[in-house]
Amino acid sequence: MKKLIIFVCVWTLGVSAGLKAQTGGELNRQMEVTRAYEPTVREASKLDIKPNMVDTVTLRPEFDYLVTPHPISYGFQVSPFRAATVDVNDYRLYTPFYVKAALGVPFQSLLDFYYNTTGMEKGFVSAYLNHYGSWSKIENDNGVKAPSTETYNKVGALGERRFGRYSLNGEIGYDYDMVSRYGYYTAGEPLPETFDTTADGLRQRFSTLHGRVAFGDTFEDLSHFNFRIGAQGAYFTDRYGYDQTDFGVGLELGKCFADRHEVTLRARYDSYRGNNDYQNDLVTVAPLYHLKTGKFDFALGVDYTFNRMTDPVSVDLTRQKHYLFPRFQMRIDVTSGYFVPYVEIDGRVRSNDYRSLTRENPYVLQQIAPNTIEYNGRVGFTGSFSSSFSYKVYGGASLYKDYLTAANYYFEADPLLNTQDEAALQNVYGESFRMLSDSLTLWTVGADLEGRISGSFGLEASVQYRGFSSSAYEHVSGVPNLTARLNLRYSYRDKLILNLGGTFLSARYFASDVYEQGAYIPSLGGNLLDHALIFDKVSPTVDLSLSAEYRISQLIGVFVQGNNLINQKLYRFYHYPGLGINLLAGVKLSF
């Protein structure tokens, strides 16, 4: 979890837990599984991620205390268009309550509830509840309709109070997620009686209590000296007794000279504490110079990060390392926004604590994993024509050290093994994932387009090709080379709204990590002497969706949404196929 300090921006809140497959290489022995057990994920590609049912993105601003650089976005993730932002003074709702509720077939449930104060001139108070549940059984690759219940829930309150140029804001919330490990695979061979395939036996649960607070300038006007301080914390637990405490504090300073020379300094400290004396501390200091002239935008800085990680399993108990990441941006706009070339360079240390891993893959085993070091470079051009057409064409490369990828894990304990270690005696048949690490080079080229053909018709389209060079592996698990998306929208007098969308993923390879200690692995047809990493190929897929909404009035609307309409086997993770054809229908209320 990245923790920094920043002023209020729009909160994009989803009830679905988009979980994407990770990429990486062969088994790195630095990682040690300590007990059986979110993607995240970083690429924007949709690897059969459960559809985002929450369309209330503008209902509440977000408190994000992650120190994000003003001109540069971290990571190799080129978004099609800049997200809309909102000033809290302009943020007003006509009604204080919003409700979106729906039921689906196969059985699904959805509820979004928001309360927002209206008419407050110097701030706001808000409360929210988000829920999504899928309660049906899904046939796994073993041919068994296994319990596959999953639910994602959030509840919380947030607010802001302004005092002239200063603001005090904060949030407190609680998240509860539950998934089922229905992705076990034995190639049709019977499972041992000791393997619990009941609904309760397959479940994993996560609970997180979290809070944030910040005070200082809004960084909207840097003509005077700006400052902001903040802190955030979280307590995370899972079903099997693993708990983790996260804590972060940050400081941001800024001043603009001569209306064009911005100088900022950001500093933060993030701490992650887990079971068995696990500690992961990150200290970052990031000075930045930013020149803004309207037609020419230039930024230059450096991020210094110190990482101290205590691994109670490894022989090397404590690792201390220093990192320097260049930060550079240049944009030139001499065409009033029609054609804007740009170059960006940045990097970071990404924490791979257990809570962060479960965000990317909720089926991951509890384990100690090294942090990921990444260096990113991007080049491209973007532009827009009036208010009806926007585009971006880009390319870039990222260098990763200890990049993590998820592999289905197979392990059968030796029945004669004399140990009190519960994890050492637990059998795993691909339903859980082990994180593997590798040094990786990723290069990407792509294009994004958004247009409004007329007052009623609109479209969004994107295509992206990714290539990989791995030092250890033949493939990068779960990541397609080619991803393409198309979404068409029709609006009739703003009363009837239709959306047709499709996502194409090229063939993917998924890794299975088989670790043998003298036992029989049915899925591979026999005994193995030591260890094997196997890649399976999954054919290209197309995910087609269609939704319709009818707005009866400004206060009430009804909608229906169909997903995976051509009934493809869409893997969120290998051996975890998602729902086939499924429908959601419900109502939206504002009052």
Image (tube, rainbow, N blue to C red):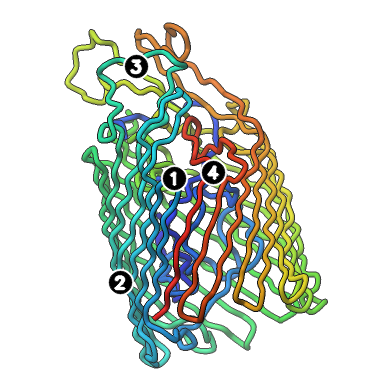
Q: Is residue 182 above or below residue 521?
A: below
Q: Looking at the image, is mark 3 or mark 4 earlier in the sequence?
A: 3
Mark 3, residue position: 191
Q: In the drawing, what numbered circle is on residue 106?
A: 1
Q: Looking at the image, is mark 1 or mark 3 earlier in the sequence?
A: 1
Q: CA distance from mark 2 to mark 4?
A: 35 Å
The residue drawn where x is 63% and y is 48% is 544
Q: Is residue 164 above or below residue 495?
A: below
Label 3: few (<14), some (14–19) or many (≥20) C-alpha neighbours in 10 Å? some
- The amino acid type found where label 4 is placed reads Ile
Label 1: few (<14), some (14–19) or many (≥20) C-alpha neighbours in 10 Å? some
Element on which disc 3 rests: loop
- The amino acid type found where label 1 is placed reads Pro
Label 2: few (<14), some (14–19) or many (≥20) C-alpha neighbours in 10 Å? some
- The amino acid type found where label 2 is placed reads Ala
Q: Image check: 349 left or right of 458?
A: left
Number of on-image labels: 4
Residue 321 placed where, x, y %?
43, 45
Mark 2, residue position: 157
